[in-house]
Amino acid sequence: MIGRETRVLLRHYLEQGLSKAAVARRCGVSERTVYRWIAAGQLDRELDDGPVRYGPRRPRPSRLDPYKEIIETRLEAYPDLSAVRLFEEIRKAGYEGGYDQVKRHVREVRPQPLPEPVRRFETPPGHQGQVDFAEFKTPWGKRHALVVVLGYSRLMWVRYYERQTMAVVMEGLESAFRYFGGVPSELLFDQMRAVIVEDNREVGGRLMENTEFLRFAHHWGFRIRACRPYRAQTKGKVERPVSYIRRSFFYGRDFASDEDLNARVLGWLDRVANVRVHGTLKERPVDRFEAERPHLKPLARWPYRPVTPLRPEPSKERDEAAADSRFVEVERRPLAEYAKIAGGVR
């Protein structure tokens, strides 16, 4: 039995008036075979009397094939590693193909998480920023990332600290305001504690109830707002970036120190995070920020000066100086000399 395509060609060539020899040459068969097909009535069958079945295509080799093992090994060690990070790593290993091919392969070998079942809401430009701490583990100890995200543009600022203290929150927010070039009208907190650790003891209190922090907010001109009871709708703008920071920046990288960690995260913000196409907005945060910048409040003329002394972020030099101040050197003398001094007193 001849195939459907061959029957179509044979019938077409014969209807055009070609000789059987010419038809045989064009179809790549012998003239006797053409006569046999005609005699057997193969050309008189209906062309659509059965479904056309095609076998599976042979997989075409791609530039990504030699690097698939690297991708799968990295995903086995770090399941949440982003396709962008994997693309950067295999390019260093010699990959010359495009990013889309890498993204498709990563999607195939790693199951996609279920979409978050919450209703998003948007805020006007300059109206709101969201703040939260996230915990990261480094070879030299636990570090806390203070994350600030502008609600309209999703422009992000991050810095890592050793502790969660009031001094850290204030210093971090002032750095974030300078990075943005302005201050949003309100900052949204998840009932963040004012001070987590102070002199090796836990101190209670909420930021929105802390008198010192209220003065700080007044100095910079923003309102303090707790995200509850609307957490499901409001908090995702800062919680999802925390997950994104872990996957795209932190996982799978080696850092030498706190200084190295903070220098590299700042470069990553400018080079990757704030210039990517945002998954929800389908726009780049830096582009939306151009529309948000004029709506931010101006920066304060000088940094906030706390009324209540705050414990600063610890440093090696400061801790060594404090340790030295706890000890007083005592000059030792023989007992006879003390007796002599005592005997001379009338």
Image (tube, rainbow, N blue to C red):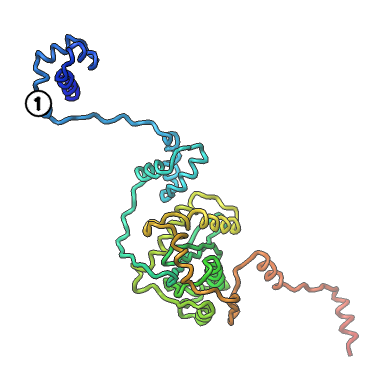
Instruction: Give how far across and how far down residue 21 sits, in percent.
Output: 20, 11
Q: Horizontally, is 177 left or right of 338 in the view?
A: left
The residue tagged with tag 1: helix, strand or loop?
loop
Residue at 51% across / 38% down in the picture?
A: 93
Q: Is 117 displayed left or right of 179 in the figure? A: left
Left or right of residue 39: residue 129: right
Q: Is residue 108 above or below residue 269?
A: above
Nearer to us in this view, 169 or 332:
169
Residue named by callout 1: 46
Report crowding for label 1: few under 14, some 14 to 19, many 20 or more residues within 10 A (C-alpha).
few
Near-viewer residue (260 or 23):
23
Q: Is residue 94 visible?
A: yes
Closer to the camera in the image, 99 or 37: 37
Q: Residue furthest top?
A: 32
Residue 188 position, x and y percent, is 43, 72
Q: Quadrant of the C terminus?
A: bottom right
* Residue 188 seen in the current view: no
Classify residue 45 as left or right of residue 71: left
Amino acid tagged 1 = Glu
In the picture as drawn, the residue positioned furthest to the front comes out as 17
Tell which residue pokes out farthest to the bottom in this image: 346
